Structure formats: structure tokens, C-alpha cells
Amino acid sequence: MKLEFITETPQETKNLGEKMGSLSKPNMVWTMSGDLGAGKTTLTQGIARGLGITRTVSSPTFTILKIYQGRLPLYHFDAYRLEGTHQELGFEEMIDGEGLTVIEWPEYMEDLDQTQPLRITLHRLGENRRQIVLETDNEKYVELMEALK
């Protein structure tokens, strides 16, 4: 299943994320791919807001993982510097936990099963304009995708 959205401003990107976050359920894994500055963290800020998280959400680039508490825990990974070492972080335990796992730069997690997550790809179409593509082969995300249409 595949959905595409165009957002014109960072606020529209956050609003889409907020709707996604409000629809999320435990044990969901969402991966985010896109160039630097494509809006991955902006979308995640909206997701956090949809989970009822009031803390400021920032990129976990140098910490690799940030955990935020809301309606569900949000496990926000940035795998850019991982290069296959995620087992040491307890990654599998988080995926099997009760939260929502968001992974930026999933291509750096060598053994991540790409058929399982909701794959989100962000493309810059201009200074603020973004194309956001959601794709999945996993039945677990059909309800979420239908609600976002």
C-alpha cells in the first residue's frame, strides 16, 4: 500500500505527523528516509505532538536514541552513525515493546527487515515544499493508512 502527500510548509508537515501520531498503536515501527533537511525531524515533532508529548523533540543524531513519554513511548532513533551496531542498544526490545519506534536513516541498520515497518520517504520539492511517501507491505498498517487517506 502506498500514500503520497505534498506539504507546503513545515507546519503542514508537523500537522501530518500529528495525525499519524494520533493514529499510532503499540509495536509500530516507522522508518524515515530522505536527504539532510528533508523534514524527518519536523515530521517526528508532529508525531510526538500526536502522541501527547509536550517536550521539545530534536534530532537524536549525536545521541542515537531519544525516548519521549506520551500516550505511547516514542523511541526516536537516528541510525546515521550506527553502521550495524544497533543490537547493543536493545533495539529489538524496543520494537517488541509498547511504544512507537521511529528510525531516521534506516539504511544504516543492516539487518532491519524493511518489509515490516511503515516506510516514510521525504523529498524536498522546494525550500519548504515536501513530498511525503508512506509505503508498507505489512497488514498491521492498513488501518492507519486508510485513516490518513
Image (cartoon, rainbow, N blue to C red):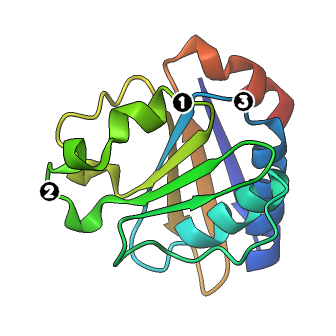
In the rendered structure, the answer to whether residue 49 lies left or right of residue 93 reads: right
For the N terminus, the quadrant is top right
Horizontal and vertical percent for residue 136?
A: 52, 27
In the rendered structure, the answer to whether residue 33 lies left or right of residue 27 reads: left
Q: Is residue 149 visible to us here?
A: no
Horizontal and vertical percent for residue 63?
A: 37, 73
Which residue is labeled 1 in the image?
97
Q: Is residue 91 above or below residue 33?
A: above
Query: SS for tag 1?
Result: loop
Q: Residues within 10 Å of mark 2 (few under 14, many from 20)?
A: few
Mark earlier in primary sequence (1, 2): 2
* Residue located 66% across and 45% down the image: 4
Query: SS for tag 3?
Result: loop
Q: Residues within 10 Å of mark 1 (few under 14, many from 20)?
A: some
The amino acid type of the residue labelled 3 equals Lys
- Per the rendering, the mark at residue 83 is 2
Q: Which residue extends farthest top?
A: 139
Query: Disc 3 and disc 1: Cα gap in Å?
Result: 11 Å
Which residue is labeled 3 in the image?
25
For the C terminus, the quadrant is top right
Mark earlier in primary sequence (3, 1): 3
Between 6 and 32, the one lying in front of the other is 32
Query: Disc 1 and disc 2: Cα gap in Å?
Result: 23 Å
* Residue located 22% across and 53% down the image: 108
Query: Disc 3 and disc 2: Cα gap in Å?
Result: 28 Å
* Residue located 66% across and 29% down the image: 26
Q: Nearer the viewer, mark 1 or mark 2?
A: 1
Quarter where residue 69 is shown: bottom right
Query: SS for tag 2?
Result: loop
